[in-house]
Amino acid sequence: MGILKSDGTGRRLDGDLGDGDRAFDGTVGDEEIRDALHGAIDKFFDRISGKSKADGAEASLDGGVSGSAAGAASSPAALDLPAMMRRLAEVGEPAWGRYILANDMLRDKIDAAEGDEMAARAAECGREWAARARERYGTNRPGEIAAKLGIAVADNPAPVSGRRALFAQYLPGSGDDARIEVLADPLNRYGTLRERLIAQASGAEGSDGGNGGNDSAADGVADLEHLLPTVARVRTLLLAHELFHAIEDRNEADIYTRTATIRLWKVFGKENRSTVRGLGEIGAGAFARELVGAPFCPFALDVLLMWAYAPDNARALYRQVLRFDE
Ligand SMILES: [Zn+2]
């Protein structure tokens, strides 16, 4: 799960991969690993970079400076992270589906009604597999399920840099060395940010002079703790998201998110169809939410984790999501 292009290059499925339960056979190179993206936001960055530069912000994540702490504190009047998370928790599933599909490479080929229907089915597919996994493995912990599937889980210490904001990824490997990596950097940054926001809120009684100050500070802290999930919860959601991609890989012959297709063209009775990568992302989000439980759609993590790098980019993502929730 991460914010990258979703142009479908993550893996090539045109070849005959044969039996459905076989793990991915490694026909892609490192550059093409199935990155578990759901956002397509690399393209999104392309679209907003001009605007960001005009704002004096750097669309690239390398700059980093505007990241973690600075953004929220320096512009208190601006849309802050807790406010965005509060609003995002109200965004309905159809809107999230449109957000994901709007960033898919094939977005222009997907009719709106067809897209809504496919997104709904993909989400349902994710939930069904979550229930199935829970029943079969007797746990809702994605790490335990991954272990039972022979998938290693590791933290990747690499810094997030460049234009990609990658939060976690599923690496199919060559069959018996499949693994899920969760990037430590975004989680560390978010953890620091969360602690700082909560510490600020708990110190708020000093500024409003006495009576009731402690109560309101306590309310503020409780509010933040509710709106901003713990690092452990975020990590579990990311892990669950990737776990769905592993499950897709192993069931690609019949899982909806890998078998549903749209028509690209039809000429004289001959047609060409394609799977839609975004459906896997929608399925992964629904799977994670169903398995782990969350008061918000896991795609809100795009905004949450992006904030620690570049608040302006996080706000832009937020606005993009809300456009689909009208
Ligand atoms: Zn994904």
Image (cartoon, rainbow, N blue to C red):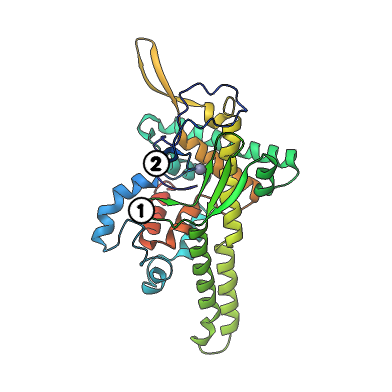
Q: Distance between the residues labelled 1 and 2?
A: 19 Å
Residue 291 percent coordinates (x, y): 65, 46
Residue 295 visible in the current orientation: no
Give the amino acid at mark 1: Gly
Identify the residue position indicated by label 1 in the image: 162
In the image: residue 277, left or right of residue 176: left
Mark nearer the viewer, 1 or 2: 1
Q: Which residue is drawn at 36% across and 72% down?
A: 75
Mark 2: give few (<14), some (14-19) or many (20+) Cα within 10 Å: many
Disc on res. 103: 2
| Residue toward you, 166 or 270 | 166
Residue type pointed to by label 2: Asn
Which type of secondary structure does the marked residue at label 2 adopt?
loop
Q: Where is residue 69 in the image (x, y as percent from the top left)?
A: 43, 70
In the image, 48 versus 25, the foreground residue is: 25
Location of residue 14 in the rendering, given as x and y in whole percent from the top left corner: 45, 24
| View extreme (bottom): residue | 210
Question: Does residue 280 lie above or below 189 as drawn?
Answer: above
